[in-house]
Each structure stands twice: as C-alpha cells, then as structure tokens.
Amino acid sequence: MAEIVYPPVIGAALTMFRALDLKIRIEGADRIPRTGGAVLVSNHISYLDFIFAGLAARPAGRLVRFMAKKEVFDHRISGPLMRGMHHIPVDRAAGAAAFGAALKALRGGEVVGVFAEATISRSFTVKEIKNGAVRMAVAANVPMIPIALWGTQRLWTKGRPRRLLQRHVPITIVVGEPMTPKRGDDYDAVTTDLRGRMSTMLDEAQRGYPEIPPGVWWQPRHLGGTAPTPEEAAKLDAEEAEARAARKAP
C-alpha cells in the first residue's frame, strides 16, 4: 500500500522530539521481526503512546497499524492522518469489523499495535486486559510482542493539562520477548501471562527511570507518587463511563 502520510508524520515527530531534546531510550528493538505479521501489545498511559510504541518498530523498518477508537478517526484533524497511516478504527459497539480488519492486516504481513487496556491507565500500572490480542495472534498465526512505555504520561495524559513542549523529558520504550500463543491454549491464561510480563517490564522501566522524585503526580502510588491507586482509578473510570452513557441517553 502507498505510504504517503506515515513517513512524513514520523519525520515531523522525530524533528519535534529532537528540538525538545527528549531522552528517548529503546530497549529490545531487535525483538520486532523485520518481516511478517506481529501483534504489538503496549501499556497505555498517554494520548501519545501510539507514536512512541511505533518508534519501537522503527529500527526494524516497520510501520505499525494501531487499533484506535473510532472517535479519533471522526475528528477533522486526526481523522485524515489516522486513515492516511492505515490505522484501524475500533467501534466498541461493533468490534467484529475491527477484529476482521486487524486479521487482514496481520495475514498480509503487517504489524498491528494494540492497547489491550482499552483506555489510559490513570494509576500508571497495567490495568486488567482482554484476550483480544491473544485471539488475533492465534488466528493470524503471528507472534505477540509486549511493550512497556514510561515517561510519555508527563507530556499528555488523562485528567492533566497538555505539556507537549516540555524539554529533556526521558522516555523509556521496552520491547519484551515475543510470545507465540497457539490454538488450544487457554486464551485467558495466556492473557494473564501477558499482563504479568507487561507489569514486570513497566515496573523495571519505572525503577530504572532517570528521574524518580517523590510526591509527583506522574509517579505511581507504590513508588511514592500521588497518582490514583488502581482502585481509585477504576472508580474514576466507572464514573466517567456512567457520565458518558448519560450524555448519550435520549
């Protein structure tokens, strides 16, 4: 497929990151295959995560097709860009179409990116995840590769003002060992294993981060920060979902 939009978007992002002197560190990029389909499964802490998770595949020369909520594609600015980069819209009320589109991409040798938590984690820990990524990898017979991001929440995350022009922010991108789930596996058990691996990778990224100041909003509670606990975050998410449902009600 023609790549008219994606390369210049990457170029613009990298130019901005250099201008801001973001300290981007990628570990394990060699674990992403240079050819063939693969499912990348990343944690989700920022509205910018698709950019940074995509950078993990750049050393392998791959472009990642991310699954993202339909509303992003409906936006007048982000919509044309998302479609131009051949990302995959997800309508939560009709997920089968997105699953089918992802399978088609995987079977065509594409790398598909998934945020299995579905929404941003306010606690900056890995939330419960569904088994869709596992089912996709099995159906397309491709590897599933966990990714952990850390530092991206400092630029723009849920419930906080955008701080896109911060300089010198460290960003950590960790690529884990590929997993190869097969037909007949217990998909929920594999998903539990996947979440455990992502949590371990994220914890290591957090503890090895160049800046670990106490009492900051962008640090998880268990590391001395003031982010909501997972329980508090779940309550906030539930309240937000209720408010959204109320707005849609006739």
Image (cartoon, grey):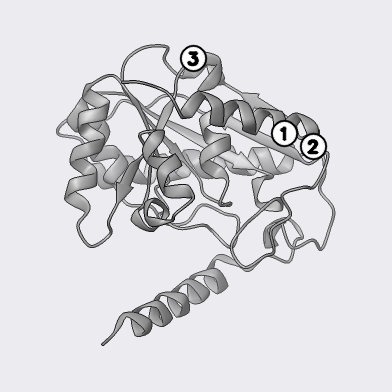
Q: Which residue is mark 2?
A: 20
First along the sequence among labels 3 and 1: 1
In the image, residue 216 sits, relative to residue 212, either above or below, namely below
Q: Residue at x 32, y 47 (%)?
A: 89
The residue singled out by tag 3 in the image is 61
Classed neighbour count for the residue bearing mark 1: other residues with Cα under 10 Å, few (<14), some (14–19), many (≥20): some
**Residue 182 visible in image:** no
Which amino acid lies under the numbered mark 1 shown in the image of this protein?
A: Phe
Q: Are marks 3 and 1 in contact (CB under 8 Å)?
A: no
* Separation of marks 1 and 2 at Cα, in angstroms: 5 Å
Left or right of 60: which side holds 13? right
The residue located at (38%, 52%) in the rendering is 129
Name the spot of residue 53 as percent of width and height, x first: 53, 35
- State yes or no: discs 1 and 2 in contact (Cβ < 8 Å): yes
**At 47% from the left edge and 71% from the top edge, which residue is drawn?**
237
Judging by the rendered image, the residue that carries numbered circle 1 is: 17
Report helix, strand or loop for mark 1. helix
204 w.r.t. 76: above or below: above
- Select label 3 or label 2 by which is in front: 2
